[in-house]
Every structure is written in C-alpha cells, then in structure tokens.
C-alpha cells in the first residue's frame, strides 16, 4: 500500500510510521531553525528584572536572608568567597537565590544534583551552559565536550570560564549597563552527592573548586538541605560562609498562606482552626499546602456564596462542620488524593449523611486497597507474608491437607511461660523485621493456600464439573506465579535478599505490613488470622 | 553618586584583598626564620647548585602552605628567569597514575612549546618525562614538581611517586619535588622504597601568633593612600580603623574568635563577613559589624535544626533518648513507636498521632541528619526495621527543648526524669 514511500526509507516501517514520517521531518526542520543557539544574555535570568520591593514581597518572611545574601554578593564586579546556603526542605533557598540574581541582573550557571545524578552529567551540564551549547536534534543531543574525570573537568571548566569572562569583559567595555564581569556558579541539592559512588572525591573537589581554579571573577554558591557539619571528611576542606534558612514559624506560615487569597477574612478564620493542630505535626509548607487546599474546599461547602465575610456564629457553625474532617484528614496529611479515592470519599460522604458523623474517624481502618491486583497475585502476596512471618518449622502443622485450622484449636497453653514467649517473639518481630524464605517454600505455601480455597469453593458450589477443571486450573495458575512474583518484586512488595552461599538460590522477603495483608485477605475472604503465628 | 562611590570602591578593594590569600601571607613572612625564607633557601640553593631535593610542607588547612609556596615560586621566577619550570599536580584530580603522567606530559609540552598528543599512552608519557628531565638537567634547568594533597598520591601503589623520586636519583637530572599536605603524618604513608629516596625535609606550618594576627589585621583593613580613592576619605577611614582596633570590645571579639579557631583562613572569612556589612552611607567599619560577623560565623547547626523541628519530631527524639537510657543497644522505628504509644497511654498526651505521621516525621529527622542509620549496608530491609541512632547528645537535646518556642512541658519532664 505504501510501497512508494518505503523505497525512500531504508528501515523497516510499520504502516502508521510510514504515514506519519513526512510530518516528523517537517517538525524537525522547523525545530532546528526556530530555536536560536543560546547567547551570552541567556546566562542572565529572564528578560525583565524585578525591583527590590517586588523581591521582598514575592518572598515573604525571608527579608533577613535576602538582605544578608545581597550584602555578601556585594556590588557588581567584587570578588566573593564561596557561600553555603542550608536549611530544611521547602524553605525557599533555591527561589531566593534565583530571584536575587534576577533582581541583580548578573549572569549565573545553575545546576542541581537532583537532575544531574552522577558526576559525568553534572560536569557536562555545567560545561554546556558555559559553552553556550544547547542539546537539540541537530547535534544528536550530545554535550559540547565529553567529560568524565575530574582532571578533564577542571581543564575544560577553566577554558570555558576564560571564554565567557572574556566575552563579558568585551560586552562591559562596550555597554554601560552590562551585567558585570563576574560569573556565578550555583550547585543545588549538594546532600545527594553523599550517596554517589565517588562522593569521597567529588565532594572535596566541589568544595575546593575556588582554590583549584584561582579565578577571582568566579563566585560559587552551594545549596543543601543539611548543614556543613554533615559534610566533614577526614582531610577536610576550606569552609564556605554559611547562610542559614530557618524553618518558618507559625506566624510566617500564616502570612504565606494568606497571600493571594480570594476571601482573606474567611481564609484567616479557616487558618485559625487548622493551623494549630497541623503545625504540631509538620511545619513544611509544601506538605501543609496540599492538605489545606482540600480542607478549605470542605470548609466552604455549607456556604452559598464565596465572598461572604463570616460572622461569629457562622464561624462556630463552620468549625463544627469541619471538625470531624480535621481528624480524618490529619491521617491524610501526606497523601495527595488520587481521583479514585476522591470518588470513594464523595460516595462515602453521601452515605455518611445518614450515619453517625463520628464513624468517619474509624473509616480509615476499613478502607479497601485502592489498586487492582489479580487473584493469583493476592494469594502470592499472602503466602509471602505468611512465609516471612511464620518460622519454617510450623509449616507442616499449619498447612496440612485439611487446611490446618483444626490443629490450632488443640493448642491451648495459657501458662505464664508461653505468654512470656509470645511477648518476646512479638518483640523480635518488631525489631528484627520479616524473615527471608527461599522460593520453594513460597511456592509450597501458595499451592496449599490455593488448593484450600479451591476446596472450600467447591464445597460451596457443590458442582462436579469443577473437579475436572481443577487440575488444569492449578497448572495454569503455576505458570502465572513466576511472572506474578517478578511483578510483585518490581512493585517492592517482595524484596530479594542476598543469596545463600550453600544453597545458591536467592531468598526473598515480604515487605508489606500486617494491615495491608489483612486488607488483601479480606478482599479474598481468606481467614488470615488462623495462619498467623502468635 | 558622590559619597556612594568611594565606599563602594573601598568595599571592592577590601573584598578582593580578602579573596586573595597571597597578599595576606606576604606581610607575615618577612622575618628570617619563617617558613617562607626557609623554603626559598632550599629551592634556590638546589637551583643554583644543580642538585636534587625534596621537601614536604605540612600543616592543617588554612595555614598558608600553598600561599607561601606560590610566593616563593613567584620570587624565584623573577630572580632566575628561564632556569625554572614548574609542574603542578593535585591529589584530588591526578591520583590515578595514568592521569598524572598525562598531566605532567601536557604541562611539560606547554612549557617547552611542544605539541601534546592526547592519544599518547602512559608508557610514552613516562618515557617523555624522563627524557625531558635528562635534557633539562643537561641544560641546567630545574624542574619543580608541586604535589598538592600529597597524602592522596600516597594511596594505592605510589607508582608515580616512585618514578618521580627515582628519576631524581640519576646524575643528570635537576628536579625539586615539593609535597603539600594537611596530614601531619604524610611521610609515614610512604612505602619503604619511596621513603628511602625521599630526603626527610619537613616544614611545619604553625598558627600565627597574636601579634602577627594584629599586624595582619591592620595590613588587610587599611586603605592605601595612593589608590584612586579620595584622600580625605582614606585618611578618615584609617584613623577610625586604628581607634577601633585598640577598642576593648574589639579585642574581646578577637580573643573569642581566635580561641575558637586560630587559622588565618577562618580570620579571613570573618573579616569578609564583617566587611560586607560595612555601612555604605558613610563607608566606615564599626565594632557592630564585627559582632554580627562573629555570631554568624559561630553557629550551632544541631541546635538550629532542633528549632526547626515540629512537635511530633521532638516527641520521637525524646522517645529515642529514653530507649537509649533504658540501654537498648539497637532500636528501630518500630521500637520507637512502641515507646511513643506507651508514653501516650501513661501520660495521657493529646498529641497522639497515627503511625504514618510518625513515620513521616521520622523521615524528616533522617533528612535533617539528627538521626541516622547505624549501618549503611542494610538496604534490603525496609526503613522501619533498620536500626537507627541519635546524632545529638543529651545536652544538646535538653538545650534545644528549653529554647524551643511553645514546647510542651511534658517533653522536658520526660527527658529529665530518666537521668
């Protein structure tokens, strides 16, 4: 059908790719022509700068840090000792420094160790920005220079810096209102370097960059979550100047949330109610903002129009309406609602209008698992949980042909010794964690459980035809099992432990909690409690 | 415009002085028995007498080893032009032998205007180096090898050190090897065969005395009268500076600073922060600048991190402290939660939160490095089962609780009770 196209295209093509291939070529050529190569001006943040007042108002409660940073950066063309910004998460370190640079209109190069997850990518990202090189389809998404070793990095960095500084000097001699002769290098998320393989060489290298390069027109700024004392090594390094970003206090958080609110008085009465209890758990702005946005919607539910100024009785009514929701959403502080759970909440909300409102507090315990798993996967998960939880010696008695439930009833020792033993085993379970098991044990337990469930299923149904299909069904189930096991491993429900040197096979460990196992068992109507060793 | 500019220019001048350590060390290296003169004597005698030499410069970080070395090399290059070529290697970058040989070869090529090929193998590079050393020896040119972070070169097989020191043993070569290290036992790290070829000359760098520091301060902070700044402003500034340096409060600040850390580098950072604080309207330094600089450089990061914690996180820290007092050797998140629930039940606390919150608070504490895992290898276990330990002491914890705003009184009682 499309043979006339296929003669031009050297590779094998499917019908759909053959029909769209002309469009792609067009897009590519537009792409490389339209995007200009980056210029020196691109090193300065954005087109329009912001005034000092805008800077202070867009970053509330950070006035002392902003003033300190501007003083340390100093007037244009003044050399600088390296700076180290540290503070908890979402305290505004990155935004403050980037907005300051936007205000001061000085060129800088920014790279974060979150996106550059190994030394080569970090080095190449910094060099690409300095060489004014952008990766696009034209150059095959390659960097300007390939750089893996620290020695090459220092050479290339020196070359690139001298290049850029010369260009900046020429520009400053021609224009009066130029961006100065200095260039700044910002490295963000330094704490992630500690987890890299080569962290013992990369960290001292980055901290000593100023001394290694000896270029006074370079300013270095490091940003990190943890303070400098977490970076100390045996041989040490020259310490940069620390600037701390303390966490926001309650008043600060209130000020931040009150910005850009459509109805300030309503929101402030809402904050009076919720800010206290929630800030006892966490004071991080990002975690609080997800919960507050949901709760505010609930808070405003009984109101007819959005723009009312609440009176005192109205505030009382709204508070009593919101109160049960606070308790339940305290448990959901860190969860961003998925669409499924929102629907579930909505349907529950309608049902709850009939029931007691206090039931909401306990509804969490009876939630179902909110993702889909096949029946085989659920049985496999339960078998893995039991294998991790119970010692191997009990398997014979628990999983005999009758399902094992009869035997348990005979063991009834209520002596003190057995109680003590139970306590110590519980303690051990808490401290040591789930045990490991080999694959054969898992499959044996799985077989037992599925035959037991098939048996009970058949007894309920009392149909003879099923008996013939039972063997076939079992075989089909078996071949699925190994696939399901690898899926569960990928989903981190089962983790692979090290391999035993004697046996040579690998051991697994189940990582789900008892609550989750109970939920899965409940969805299968499987009596998990009978099989747990206590 | 009129008054701003001299202050700004003065600020830029002071800042560039503080960022350039060479100028600093020049002023304290005048005396004849300082390390500067000794080092100069060693190197210049080996240059003039055409002999080989090796020396180690040892001292903690920030004591000016590299700065003094650079000063000596600069002076020698002026005194004996064309007789010295300098090769600089750094242990952080070139500890791998192949890398180091490549770097030596490329620097030698640059010095002697030869073309350097990146494809040369390490054998080629080492033969080239030996050949150049021979040629330089015949031409009475000395090659100075500067090895920064010397202790990092002494890791592994020390092939580079051996080949360098071995090349120096031949009659026709003229080389000086200078090692700079912050480990005072760097020469103990050398292998036997390397150590036997090494002349055991060590120069120890000690912290400057108080008088030296005083002279240094004056030298750094005074403005020169022959610069482009207006003379009246400079004279007034120097007068004010002089009166401030003899002020009692300033002397107290200096004693506090030097008793904490007396390295020159630390002093320079302190001065940098103080200078940045300079009042831009009248352009003079005052004692308040130095006071704020002192408080911003002497920090207590763990106490700051404790102030940043939320109340639930403080509860978890107190529970961990109680577990430690009960002499439980290793405890994990589950044991901490058990303790927390026990406290909540016995003391009827209203801050009874669910397990998922406590887990999140636990993760925040891990991020902030107030607690950490005992071993870094147990990655196969989930976070709840890995043993953890506290990274702050009891004293820091109780200090933090005392200075925490609106700390529940029960927390302080819980920590104190089990002393």
Image (cartoon, grey):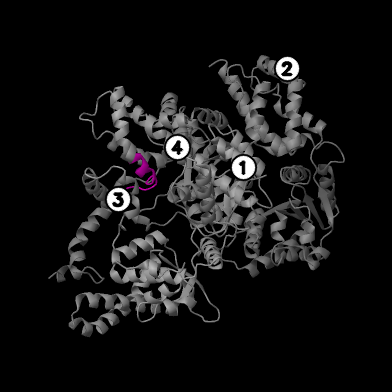
Residue holding disc 1: B415
Question: Which residue shows up at 64% across the image and 28% down it?
Answer: B274
Residues marked 2 and 1 touching at CB (< 8 Å): no
Q: Earlier in the sequence, mark 4 or mark 3?
A: 4
Magenta-tinted stretch:
A325-338
Q: Please tell me how crowded label 1 is: few (under 14), some (14-19), or many (20+) other residues with Cα within 10 Å.
A: some
Distance CA(mark 2)–CA(mark 1):
54 Å
Chain for disc number 2: B
Q: For this rendering, which residue is in front, B72 or A278?
A: A278
Distance CA(mark 2)–CA(mark 4):
53 Å
Q: Quadrant of residue A80?
A: top right
Residue holding disc 3: A338
Q: Quadrant of residue B212?
A: top right
Chain for disc number 3: A
Is residue A337 found inside the magenta-colored segment of the image?
yes
Question: Which residue shows up at 78% across the image and 43% down it?
Answer: B79
Camera-side mark, 2 or 4: 4
Q: Secondary structure at mark 1?
A: helix
Residue holding disc 2: B239
Distance CA(mark 3)–CA(mark 1):
41 Å
Q: Position of residue B397 (x, y in %)?
A: 62, 41
Residue holding disc 4: A279
Is the residue at mark 2 from the same chain as the one at mark 4? no
Chain for disc number 1: B
Q: Position of residue A156 (x, y in %)?
A: 54, 52
Does A22 appear above or below A275? below
Q: Position of residue A58 (x, y in %)?
A: 41, 30
Distance CA(mark 2)–CA(mark 3):
69 Å
Q: Please tell me how crowded label 4 is: few (under 14), some (14-19), or many (20+) other residues with Cα within 10 Å.
A: some
Camera-side mark, 2 or 3: 3
Is the residue at mark 2 from the same chain as the one at mark 1? yes
């Amino acid at each position: 059908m499309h043979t006339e196209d296929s003669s031009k295209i050297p590779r094998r093509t499917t019908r759909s790719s053959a029909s769209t291939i002309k469009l792609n070529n067009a897009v590519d050529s537009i792409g490389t022509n339209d995007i200009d190569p980056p210029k020196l001006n691109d090193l300065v943040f954005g087109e329009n700068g912001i005034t000092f007042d805008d800077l202070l108002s867009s970053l509330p409660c950070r006035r002392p840090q902003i003033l300190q940073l501007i003083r340390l950066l100093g007037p244009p063309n003044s050399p600088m000792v390296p700076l180290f910004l540290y503070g908890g998460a979402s305290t505004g370190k990155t935004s403050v420094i980037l907005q300051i640079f936007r205000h001061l209109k000085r060129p800088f190069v920014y790279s974060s160790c979150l996106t550059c997850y190994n030394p080569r990518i970090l080095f190449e990202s910094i060099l690409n920005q300095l060489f004014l090189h952008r990766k696009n389809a034209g150059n095959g998404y390659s960097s300007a220079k390939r750089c893996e070793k620290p020695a090459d990095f220092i050479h290339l960095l020196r070359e690139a810096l001298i290049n850029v500084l010369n260009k900046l000097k020429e520009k400053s001699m021609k224009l009066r209102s130029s961006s100065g002769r200095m260039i700044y290098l910002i490295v963000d998320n330094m704490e992630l370097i500690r987890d890299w393989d080569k962290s013992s060489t990369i960290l001292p290298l980055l901290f000593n960059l100023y001394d290694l390069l000896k270029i006074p027109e370079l300013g270095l700024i490091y940003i990190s979550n943890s303070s400098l004392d977490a970076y100390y090594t045996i041989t040490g390094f020259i310490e940069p100047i620390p600037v701390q970003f303390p966490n926001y206090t309650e008043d600060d958080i209130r000020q931040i949330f009150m910005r850009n609110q459509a109805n300030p008085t309503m929101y402030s009465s809402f904050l009076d109610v919720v800010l206290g209890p929630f800030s006892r758990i966490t004071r991080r702005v990002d975690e609080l903002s997800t919960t507050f946005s949901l709760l505010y919607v609930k808070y405003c539910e009984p109101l007819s129009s959005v723009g009312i100024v609440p009176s005192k009785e109205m505030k009382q009514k709204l508070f009593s309406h919101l109160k049960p929701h606070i308790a339940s959403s305290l448990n959901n502080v860190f969860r961003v609602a998925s669409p499924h759970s929102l629907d579930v909440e909505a349907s529950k909300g309608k049902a709850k209008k009939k029931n007691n409102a206090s039931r909401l507090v306990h509804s969490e315990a009876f939630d179902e698992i909110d993702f889909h798993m096949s029946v085989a996967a659920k049985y496999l998960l339960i078998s893995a949980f039991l294998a991790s939880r119970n010692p191997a010696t009990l398997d014979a008695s628990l999983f005999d042909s009758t399902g094992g439930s009869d035997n348990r009833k005979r063991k009834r020792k209520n002596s003190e010794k057995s109680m003590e033993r139970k306590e110590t085993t519980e303690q051990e379970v808490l401290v040591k964690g789930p045990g490991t098991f080999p694959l054969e044990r898992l499959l044996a337990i799985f077989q037992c459980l599925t035959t037991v469930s098939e048996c009970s299923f058949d007894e309920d149904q009392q149909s003879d035809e099923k008996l013939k299909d039972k063997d076939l069904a079992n075989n089909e189930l078996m071949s699925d099992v190994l696939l399901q096991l690898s899926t569960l491993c990928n989903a981190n429900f089962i983790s692979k432990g090290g391999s035993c040197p004697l046996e040579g096979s690998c051991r697994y460990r189940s990582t789900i909690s008892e609550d989750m196992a109970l939920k899965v068992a409940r969805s299968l109507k499987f009596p998990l409690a009978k099989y747990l060793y206590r | 415009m009129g008054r701003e500019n001299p202050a700004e220019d003065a600020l830029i001048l002071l800042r560039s002085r503080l960022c350039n350590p060479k100028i600093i060390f020049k002023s304290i290296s005048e005396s004849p028995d300082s390390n500067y003169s000794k080092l100069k004597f060693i190197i210049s005698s080996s240059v003039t007498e055409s002999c080989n030499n090796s020396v180690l410069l040892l001292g903690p970080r920030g004591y000016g080893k590299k700065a003094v070395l650079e000063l000596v090399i600069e002076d020698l290059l002026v005194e004996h032009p064309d007789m010295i070529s300098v090769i600089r290697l750094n242990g952080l970058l070139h500890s791998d032998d192949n890398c180091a040989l490549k770097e030596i070869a490329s620097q030698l090529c640059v010095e002697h205007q030869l073309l350097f090929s990146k494809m040369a193998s390490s054998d080629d590079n080492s033969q080239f180096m030996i050949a150049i050393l021979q040629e330089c020896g015949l031409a009475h040119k000395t090659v100075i090898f500067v090895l920064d972070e010397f202790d990092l070169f002494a890791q592994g097989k020390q092939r580079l050190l051996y080949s360098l020191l071995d090349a120096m043993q031949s009659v026709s070569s003229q080389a000086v090897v200078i090692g700079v290290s912050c480990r005072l036992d760097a020469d103990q790290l050398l292998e036997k065969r390397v150590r036997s070829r090494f002349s055991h000359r060590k120069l120890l760098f000690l912290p400057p005395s108080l008088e030296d520091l005083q002279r240094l301060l004056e030298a750094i902070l005074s403005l020169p009268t022959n610069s482009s700044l207006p003379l009246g402003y400079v004279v007034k500034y120097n007068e004010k500076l002089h009166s401030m340096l003899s002020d009692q409060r300033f002397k107290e600040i200096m004693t506090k600073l030097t008793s904490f850390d007396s390295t020159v580098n630390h002093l320079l950072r302190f001065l940098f922060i103080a200078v940045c604080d300079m009042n831009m309207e009248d352009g003079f330094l005052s004692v308040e600048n130095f006071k704020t600089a002192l408080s911003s450089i002497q920090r207590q990061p763990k106490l700051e991190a404790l102030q940043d914690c939320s109340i639930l996180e403080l509860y978890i820290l107190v529970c961990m402290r109680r577990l430690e007092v009960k002499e439980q050797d290793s405890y994990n998140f589950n044991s901490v939660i058990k303790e927390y629930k026990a406290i909540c039940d016995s003391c009827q606390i209203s801050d009874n939160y669910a397990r998922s919150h406590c887990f999140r608070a636990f993760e925040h504490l891990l991020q902030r490095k107030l607690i950490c895992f005992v071993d870094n290898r147990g990655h196969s276990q989930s976070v709840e089962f890995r043993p953890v330990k506290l990274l702050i002491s009891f004293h820091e914890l109780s200090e933090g609780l005392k200075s925490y705003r609106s700390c529940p009184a029960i927390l302080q009682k819980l920590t104190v009770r089990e002393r």
